[in-house]
Image: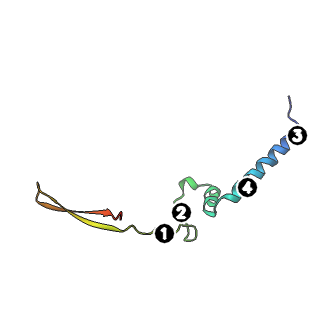
Amino acid sequence: EEIPVDVIAESIALVRRQQENLRAELTSLELAFFEDTEAEHSNAVPTSEEQAEPVKPVERAELLVAVPESGVEVAAVVPDLM
């Protein structure tokens, strides 16, 4: 059984519209990744405009712990959870 040409044309048009909608939802960085034919092997660094906002540093506190067996003080940096 052959599929009518108009059904095939409608299916192709629908897929194209879906792809266009998907492309419109992608960020410029995501779009560049998919358009890059060698994206899997690319190590290009995104421009400053494409990079996410910098993360605020976590406040840390230093904790000195005495280890009785060795007689050595150990310094550990732990996140300040307060």
The crowd level at tag 2 (other Cα within 10 Å; few <14, some 14-19, many 20+) is few
Determine the image quadrant of residue 38.
Answer: bottom right
Where is mark 3, residue-wise? 5
Where is mark 4, residue-wise? 21
How far apart marks 4 and 1 lie (CA) works out to 30 Å
Taking the spot 54% from the left edge, 67% from the top edge, the residue there is 51
Q: Residue 81 location, x and y as percent?
A: 36, 63
Q: Which quarter of the rendered picture does the N terminus lie within?
A: top right
Q: Are marks 2 and 3 in contact (CB under 8 Å)?
A: no
How far apart marks 2 and 1 lie (CA) works out to 19 Å
| Disc 2 residue type (three-letter) | Ala
Disc on res. 54: 1
Q: Are marks 3 and 4 in contact (CB under 8 Å)?
A: no
Q: Farthest bottom residue? A: 48
Q: Residue 26 location, x and y as percent?
A: 65, 58
Q: Are marks 1 and 3 in contact (CB under 8 Å)?
A: no
Query: In terms of secondary structure, where does tag 2 sit?
Result: loop
Point out the frontmost of discs 4 and 2: 4
Q: Going from the N terminus, do you reach mark 2 or mark 3 first?
A: 3
